[in-house]
Image (cartoon, rainbow, N blue to C red):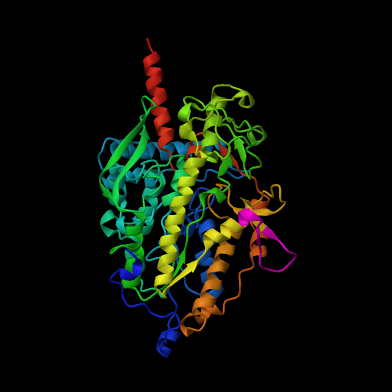
Amino acid sequence: MRIQQLPMAPPRRANSQTTPNDADKPLKLVTVGDSLSAGFQDATLIHTGQEANFSNLIAKQAGLDFKQPLFSEGGVPPAVFLGHDAAITKALWSYAMVGAAVALPMAMIGAGFVPPELLLEPLYSAGGMGKLMTEGPVQNVAVPNFELRHLTDVSNVGDLMQEMVDGANSAGPLFMMAPYVRNILQEGGKAAQGKSEIDRAVEQKPDLITFWAGNNDALESASQMTVDDRTLTPVEDRVWEYTTTNPITGSRVTKQTPHVMKGFKNAFDGPEGALTRLLNETDAEIMLMNIPDVTVIPFLRQVGDKVGDLPFRIALPDGTDLTQTIEDWTIPTKIRGEGHEGRTEFPRGTMVSLGMLLKKAHHIFLEHYDLAKADSVLSEDDVLDPDEIGKVRQRTVEFNQIISDAAASNSRVHLVDVAGLLNQTKQGGVSLRGEGPEMKVTNTFTGVSGQTGQDGIFGYDGIHPANVGHAVIANRILDTIKTDLGDNPRFAALANAEAIDEKAILASDPRRDARPVIVLGWSSAAIDGDVQEYFDEREANCHSKAQEKP
């Protein structure tokens, strides 16, 4: 079913006439999406990252009012990349408090029950958690970790936890997603006050919407090292099959959702899809971003290669610095356990996440093994082999075809090719705009020049753009606005806005000089945005020790 067949409002031409009164009204910009739109950086949502996000840069450049749900120091979740003056013991205490606060709700979800809202209160006030600094309606309603269907289907923490009970979502991200939903969609209030992202956007009667969603519908397979219906959203509606790990036996179990789940197509431009509703219920022009290839992110490392230079230091909880040891570690190709079709080595092109590598390194160091001599570390379930990566990339192509069809079908929808932009960073780099000598950025970390000698566009977590990445994306959106809406006086402030100085933003980014530390344990689980495995391992260890007692 193509978007032009839907019962949408008649398309409005991008250069449609506006009345003088319309042209004099303040322009309203609203942002919907996921962590990439929210300004999530370095594995946390905090005001410094939010203020650097592409929508805020665009608003500032055009002189628009743009209010965001800013989170105070500490962030949500508490920062896992610690500055040079941060106390490791204090950080570990914060992680412990958050873990304790979320343990009971996660246990109830695991048992098939939606926890009462009251049980989440300790999580919201856990030590180290950032607090909401703004009040009232905000124009950036993007929620980190959201998949496309969540933009219309999740209004409050109850909806979120019901999805987790149904198996459509892991409960692992609850420690971060519940505070996001409460503070952004519920505006800090009770669940009954919650509204979905699309509802929040519609009620503000926006003139322009930036829409970048669906990234997690593909990216979760890379962060969780698993390809199933839960981590790689099917295009069509169907009952989902997914795999989970039994925390007692460690075996993999295949499960199904109890009902048909909404696929990407229906969630996007179905009768109640996110784009359909924005077109039907607003008069806004929509800047629509597509979905990058997951292999462009430095979060994924190739098995058989060295881990390589990292923008952060790595330490054990006792403070022992392991950075050089891990950077020099050649990721073993020998398979731990049974390999597919009897293979004993991973094929070239197999990839593993930084989060998984840090978890494995932590286990090895805890058991006092020599990392360099650990030749069988990763199982088939810990990596994405070339076939699995091919599935993720092909599904991303299908998602982007749906997105590009939508842009071609309605003149109010304007495609911004972020996928092409990030591919360019991988293939040789993107030239930066601004004063000074020629500079390029590539698909590595800001602060790590790599083999090319060029800086990177990604933050410490290797998934989310650093400041310069947001600046480059913001300029691409402004370019599209100037091209498609430049002759519409309604958008004169944006059409006349100067390009953002990307070189200046890169030069001022503290990541170029700072090298924070990440502590193995909770931190290396939180970098994936899912601490389910952390709790599963603790439970398995406790069970194992109990069996060893006389």
The quadrant holding residue 439 is: bottom right
* 187 w.r.t. 463: above or below: below
Q: Residue furthest right?
A: 437
**Rendered image quadrant of residue 440:** bottom right
Q: Nearer the viewer, residue 403 or 53?
A: 403
Q: Position of residue 460 (x, y in %)?
A: 58, 47
Is 456 inside the magenta-drawn segment? no
User: Is residue 474 positioned above or below 340 on the image?
Assistant: below
Q: Is residue 53 visible?
A: no
Range of magenta residues: 425-440
- Residue 313 percent coordinates (x, y): 63, 39
- Hey, which quadrant is residue 182 in on the image? bottom left
* Residue farthest toward the bottom in the current orientation of the protein: 20
Could you say which is closer to the camera, residue 159 or residue 259? 259
Residue found at the very far front of the displayed protein: 341
- Looking at the rendered image, the quarter that the N terminus falls into is bottom left
The chief SS type of the magenta part is loop
220 or 260: nearer the eye? 260
Horizontal relation, residue 48 to residue 143: left or right: right
**Is 198 placed above or below 377 here?**
below
Image point 42% across, 29% down: which residue? 537
Q: Can you give x and y, in whole percent of width and height, for residue 290 in the image?
A: 47, 61
Quarter of the image that includes the C terminus: top left
Who is closer to the viewer here, 390 or 99?
Answer: 390
